[in-house]
Image: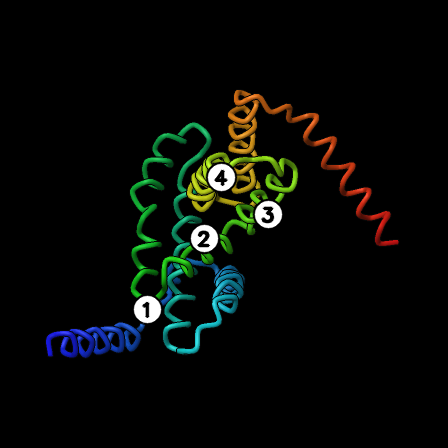
Amino acid sequence: MKKVLYTALMSLFTLTISAQTVALKTEGQDPKYVETIKGRAQKIVDGLQLTDAQKAENVRNIIANRYFLLNDIHSKYDKTQQDARDAELYKHHFELASALALYLTDEQIDAVKDGMTYGRLKRDYKAMLEMIPSLTEQEKAQVLIYLKEAREYAMDGGDSKQKHWWFDKYRGRTNNWLSARGYNLDKERENWQKRIEEQKTKQK
């Protein structure tokens, strides 16, 4: 009986959350910029394949509002005020995941993060595994940890250049860690390129 009641309450809670409307915070934003961001956010939402139209709209608005907030923060500070900017970014960093958690699973939230960072985590992880197929499970896990850290920082980047910069920085950190474990990255990269060329030759 308790289980049935709990299930019913959770279903009611889910329906209530889904029925709520998340408004776009467009005050002070350029109308053309708003449309650009709505399109960018919608593209991410489309990838989630949500069947509830209201939930999809709420998620799109949460993502769009995040872009508006980031733009406001980055526009507020110049290069001499990076510490203040970073402090404000950190203050708001966890708000996105918290807001999305009302509507999405952890896996879907990860998909949103990937969408906001150009899918670099998956691409870089795939490339690392292909470049060094002898990585142990422990080493693979650590590489993924570095990439997830990079993604968290990249999500707060003010533009694509800043977002990619964080992944490049952590790629260097990952390479240093692997070098310290005895991997010759130059040799691994050379062998990887040879395998790619061999595969191309076979497909001709």
Asked if the residues shown at circle 3 and circle 4 are in contact, with their CB atoms under 8 angstroms apart, the answer is no
Residue 160 or 154: which is nearer the viewer?
A: 154
- Establish if 99 lies above or below 79: below
Label 4's element? Answer: helix
* Kind of residue sitting beneath label 1: Val
Pointer 3 or 1: first along the chain: 1
* Spatial separation of the CA atoms under disc 2 and disc 3: 14 Å
- The N terminus lies in quadrant: bottom left
Which corner quadrant of the image does residue 21 belong to? bottom left
* Spatial separation of the CA atoms under disc 3 and disc 1: 32 Å
Pointer 3 or 4: first along the chain: 3
Residue underneath mark 2:
113
Asked if the residues shown at circle 2 and circle 4 are in contact, with their CB atoms under 8 angstroms apart, the answer is no
Residue underneath mark 1:
22
Residue 124: % across, % down: 58, 43
Determine whether, in the image, residue 102 is placed left or right of residue 161.
left
Residue underneath mark 4:
137
Pointer 1 or 2: first along the chain: 1
Residue 110: % across, % down: 43, 54
Q: Which mark is residue 123?
A: 3
| Circle nearer the viewer, 2 or 4 | 4
| Circle nearer the viewer, 1 or 2 | 2
* Spatial separation of the CA atoms under disc 1 and disc 2: 19 Å
